[in-house]
């Protein structure tokens, strides 16, 4: 298997992490994990630099700061992945406008492929497992790259912290269960890529996260 390249970009009005993935000397395709508002320009610069074409956007969840930039891409050609439990936020993002930046136009996102807990994705010959981790919002999913020992977790868990559970559809007890059952059960040396802030690791969070003990 070829080397997976991961470019982390901190984008949008509240510094949301997006990740562009491609293979070194691969087939020229790229996948974007999360599309914050105004993401396109920065993403396009990386696509041009690496001579890549975007083929899919995988959304960890339906909050505006993770999907508000989708509509700016040429979406006719893209597979857009999300979880059904966030369908209302993808399709009617205006319901979250009181939690967004005033004046920011929130355009709906049409998911072309709904994924569920336990689904497997094939990305350039590698296995990616979907884990559904509600609690921050109803439909947060994480993308676990087994071979690369990385997991893109959206707003489930952060370095030394966890996702807020006070937004509509959030519930701390549910979030705690998701973290214990779907994050802390990943191999200890798995690198975690949260939707905000620095990367962290399963072993580090299990031993020191102050909000959810292993
Ligand atoms: Zn969120």
Image (cartoon, rainbow, N blue to C red):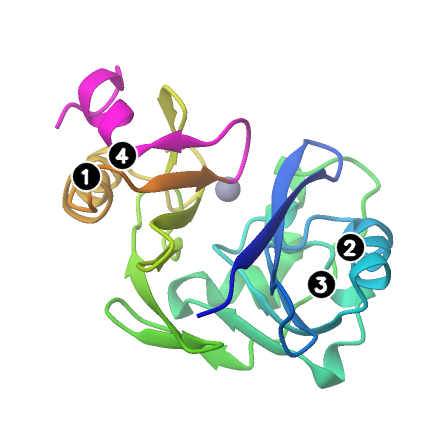
Q: What is the C-alpha distance between the residues marked 4 and 2?
A: 28 Å
> Label 4 near label 1: C-beta < 8 Å?
yes
Residue range corresponding to the magenta coloring: 195-214
How far apart marks 2 and 1 lie (CA) works out to 31 Å
Q: Are marks 2 and 1 in contact (CB under 8 Å)?
A: no
- Give yes or no for contact between labels 3 and 1 (Cβ–Cβ under 8 Å): no
Residue drawn 78% across and 55% down? 43
Between 4 and 117, the one lying in front of the other is 4
What label sits on residue 202 in the rendered view? Answer: 4
- Kindly report the distance in space between the C-alpha atoms of the residues bearing marks 4 and 3: 30 Å
Q: Which residue is mark 2?
A: 43
Residue 89 is situated, as x and y percent measured from the top left of the image, at 54, 59
Q: Judge the density around disc 4: few (<14), some (14-19), many (≥20) Cα neighbours within 10 Å.
A: many
Disc with the residue nearer the chain's start (4 vs 2): 2
**Left or right: residue 172 compared with residue 31:** left
Q: Position of residue 154 (x, y in %)?
A: 46, 45
Q: Residue at x 43, y 70 (%)?
A: 1
Secondary structure found at label 1: loop
Dot 3 falls on a residue whose secondary structure is: helix
Q: Can you say whether 197 is above or below 106 in the image? A: above
Q: Can you give x and y, in whole percent of width and height, for residue 86 in the image? A: 45, 61
Give the camera-side residue of 5 and 9: 5
- Bin the neighbour count of mark 3 within 10 Å (Cα to Cα): few under 14, some 14-19, many 20 and up: many
Q: Earlier in the sequence, mark 3 or mark 1?
A: 3
Dot 2 alpha-carbon crowd within 10 angstroms: few under 14, some 14 to 19, many 20 or more: many
Residue located beneath label 3 in the image: 70
Q: Residue at x 83, y 59 (%)?
A: 44
Circle nearer the N terminus (2, 1): 2
114 with respect to 28 (left or right):
left
């Amino acid at each position: 298997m070829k080397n997976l390249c991961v470019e982390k970009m901190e984008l949008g009005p509240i510094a949301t992490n997006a990740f562009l993935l491609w293979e070194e000397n691969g087939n020229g395709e790229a996948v974007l994990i999360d599309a914050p508002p105004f993401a396109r320009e920065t993403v396009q610069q990386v696509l041009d630099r690496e001579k890549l074409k975007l083929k899919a956007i995988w959304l960890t969840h339906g909050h505006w700061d993770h999907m508000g930039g989708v509509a700016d891409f040429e979406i006719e050609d893209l597979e857009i992945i999300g979880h059904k439990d966030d369908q209302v936020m993808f399709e009617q993002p205006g319901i979250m406008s009181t939690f967004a930046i005033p004046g920011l136009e929130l355009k709906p996102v049409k998911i072309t492929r709904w994924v569920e807990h336990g689904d497997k994705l094939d990305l350039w010959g590698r296995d990616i497992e979907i884990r559904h981790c509600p609690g921050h919002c109803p439909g947060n999913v994480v993308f676990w790259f087994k071979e690369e020992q990385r997991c893109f977790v959206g707003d489930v868990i952060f370095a030394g912290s966890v996702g807020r559970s006070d937004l509509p559809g959030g519930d701390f007890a549910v979030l705690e269960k998701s973290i214990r059952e779907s994050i802390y059960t990943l191999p200890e040396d798995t690198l975690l890529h949260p939707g905000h802030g620095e990367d962290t690791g399963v072993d580090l969070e299990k031993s020191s996260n102050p909000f959810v003990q292993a």
